[in-house]
Amino acid sequence: MTIYADLHLHSKHSRATSKELDIDNLEKWARVKGLNLLGTGDFTHPTYLGELKAQLEPTGRGLFRLKNQSESIVFMLTGARS
């Protein structure tokens, strides 16, 4: 399987980003771009973490997908080391 990924994305909870950067839109536009793996940062933001927990389910090996959608884009929680 070939992996097409964007591993550095921010959510709507990051500064100077679109308020449209929610899980559904990230997944939608990943499909348009032909991606099958997204790395989503900002998961330490309390509100965004709640959204992630509510909308994603684990697939194993640290990856997640939209709940009840086996054909969903796969998400990976990413962060920068300081």
Image: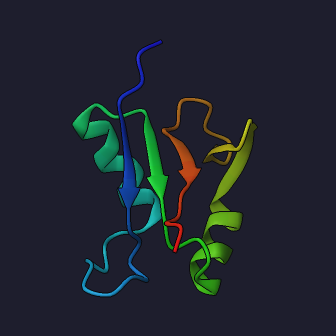
Total numbered circles: 0
Nearest the eye: 3 or 22? 3
Specify whether 63 is left or right of 18: right
Q: Which x, y percent locates residue 4? A: 35, 29
Residue ID at (47%, 61%): 23
Instruction: Indicate how the structure is coloured in the image.
Output: rainbow
The vertical placement of 12 against 70, above or below, is below
Residue ID at (51%, 73%): 42
Specify whether 19 is left or right of 1: left
The vertical placement of 6 against 52, above or below, is above
The quadrant where residue 49 appears: bottom right
The quadrant where residue 35 appears: top left
Residue ID at (25%, 85%): 16
Q: Which x, y percent locates residue 40? A: 48, 59
The vertical placement of 8 against 45, above or below, is above
Q: Which x, y percent locates residue 56? A: 65, 54
Residue ID at (67%, 48%): 67
**Farthest front residue?**
82
Nearest the eye: 64 or 20? 64
Q: Which x, y percent locates residue 28? A: 35, 48
